[in-house]
C-alpha cells in the first residue's frame, strides 16, 4: 500500500454497528476514510480505532448529532473513535447521507432481522 496522506484520502458515508459488550448493538452513522474501511474489511486493523466524522444516530423519531443542539451535545466536535474490534458491520451509504438539520428524515432507517428501528 502506498504511503499517502490521510488528509487527501477519499471519505465515505457509512452506518456502523458496534457491539459494546454491555447492552447489545449500537448503530452510528458518519464519514470515515475509505482507506480505513478497506483496511477494516481486510482484517488489518487490530487493537486500533477508526475515526468516524460527523457522527449521528437515531433515537426513536429524532436525529442526534454530535456538535449540534442546545444541550451538552453541542460541546462535542462530531468525531468519534471506534475500536476496530467492536465493529460488527459497516454499511456504505450514499454520498448525501448527512441529515438535513431543518427536516431530518428517518425514511431510510428500516429494521433488519434481529434489530429494531434505530
Image (cartoon, rainbow, N blue to C red):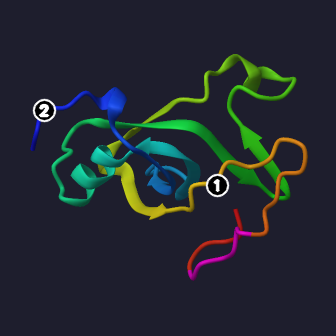
Farthest residue in the bottom direction? 113
Relative side of 23 to 72, left or right: left
Name the chief secondary structure element in magenta. loop
Q: Which mark is residue 110?
A: none
Residue 54, position as x, y percentages in the image: 60, 36
Q: Which residues are magenta?
A: 108-113
Q: Is residue 98 above or below residue 117?
A: above
Whether 93 is among the magenta residues is no
Instruction: Mark 2 or mark 1: name the one nearer the start of the chain.
Output: 2
47 sits to left or right of 75: left
**Identity of the residue drawn at 21% across and 45% down:** 45
Quadrant of residue 65 within the rendered picture? top right
Q: Secondary structure at mark 2?
A: loop
Q: Position of residue 96 (x, y in %)?
A: 64, 54
Residue picked out by circle 2: 3
Nearer to the camera, 13 or 76: 13
Callout 1: helix, strand or loop?
loop
Q: Which residue has dot 1 on it?
A: 97
Classify 70 as above or below 100: above
Residue 48 in the image: x percent, y percent? 25, 36
Task: Residue 114 in the image: state x and y as whole percent.
Answer: 56, 78
Say which residue appears at 35% left-offset and 27% top-offset. 7
* Pointer 1 local density, CA inside 10 Å: few below 14, some 14–19, many at least 20: some
- CA gap between label 2 and label 1 equals 29 Å
Amino acid at each position: 500500500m502506498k504511503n499517502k496522506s490521510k488528509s487527501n484520502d477519499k471519505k465515505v458515508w457509512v452506518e456502523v454497528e458496534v457491539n459494546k459488550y454491555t447492552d447489545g448493538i449500537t448503530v452510528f452513522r458518519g464519514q470515515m476514510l475509505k482507506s480505513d474501511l478497506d483496511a477494516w474489511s481486510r482484517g488489518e486493523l487490530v487493537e486500533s480505532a477508526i475515526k468516524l466524522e460527523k457522527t449521528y444516530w437515531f433515537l426513536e423519531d429524532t436525529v442526534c448529532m454530535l456538535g449540534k443542539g442546545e444541550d451538552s451535545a453541542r460541546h462535542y466536535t462530531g468525531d468519534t473513535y471506534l475500536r476496530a474490534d467492536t465493529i460488527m458491520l459497516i454499511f456504505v451509504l450514499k454520498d448525501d447521507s448527512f441529515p438535513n438539520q431543518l427536516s431530518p428524515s428517518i425514511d431510510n432507517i428500516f429494521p433488519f432481522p434481529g434489530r429494531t428501528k434505530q
